[in-house]
Amino acid sequence: MDSVVEYSGLLLEGLGVTVMVTVLGAALTIAVAFAAGLAGLSRHWFLRWPSFVFVEFIRGSGLLVQMFWFFFALPFLGIQLHPVLAGVLALGLNEGAYAAEIVRGTIRSRPKGQAEAAIALGMSRTQRLWRILIPQSVPAILPSFGNVMVDLLKNTSLVSLVTVGDLTWRAFNARTVTGATVELFLTILVMYYILSLIIGRITRLLENRFALDRKAKLRARREARRGVGAQ
């Protein structure tokens, strides 16, 4: 383990890059997921069809190929992207395409009675979507989104192939110098696992925060307190 201790600073720097790429990729994933997912629910073909083509194309082509395209192919078209930007774009678009189907399927699965009640109240389609359907869909979306984020974290190791100095890249460089393959790769294996546990914990906290039954209980408690106060 001497090699791990010797290169601990280098590994921690790589860990910071991995966390940064994960956070940026997660933000892009969420934005793409809701944009493409909601577009897929649109009644307008000029929104629905581009969403369908985007999701099918991104899911049907490999993440690594997409990353190589952003980093190695675009310069031939006059577009030079920073390695981190190329990695984040590939990760966010790829994971976002998968998450878009989660958003679309979850919102579509909401009981029809919810929409009918909103229509009876005179709500527009946009109001029904943002005030009723999306808030009620968030608790159901979160567990699947947690899995997407863990998958995103694991896929960040691929950015090392486009010269991003992440955790995997720095461990590989340290291994090249020291030859301590087992120790170094076991160390980063544990580090990725710990990061996955953290993401899982955050997901569970969010699930508890947005749980519908929890909201109902809190509402009941508030009403009970008001009733006691009125007496």
Image: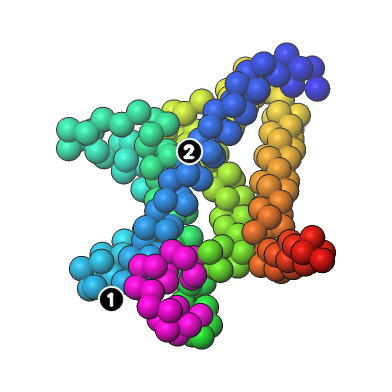
Q: Residue at x 70, y 65 (%)?
A: 219
Q: Quadrant of residue 34?
A: bottom left
Give above or below for 172 relative to 86.
Answer: above
* Secondary structure predominantly adopted by residues drawn in magenta: helix
Where's residue 138, x and y in %?
56, 63
Residue position for label 2: 24
Vertical arrangement, residue 14 with respect to residue 74, above or below = above
Residue 63 at least partly seen: no
Pick the front one: 207 or 83? 207
Q: Which portion, as a residue range, is magenta?
A: 114-134
SS category of the residue bearing label 2: helix
Residue 182's spot in the image, x, y percent? Answer: 74, 32
How crowded is the residue under tag 1: few (<14 C-alpha within 10 Å), some, or many (20+)? few
Queried whether the magenta region covers residue 123, the answer comes back as yes
Specify the amino acid type for callout 1.
Arg
For the C terminus, give its image quadrant. Answer: bottom right
Q: Nearer the viewer, residue 19 or 61?
A: 19
Instruction: Please state which of the two labelled residues, at mark 1 or mark 2, is closer to the viewer.
Output: 1
Residue 212 in sight: yes
Indicate which disc residue 43 carries. 1
Q: Earlier in the sequence, mark 1 or mark 2?
A: 2
Give the amino acid type for the residue marked by disc 2 in the picture: Leu
Q: Which mark is residue 89?
A: none
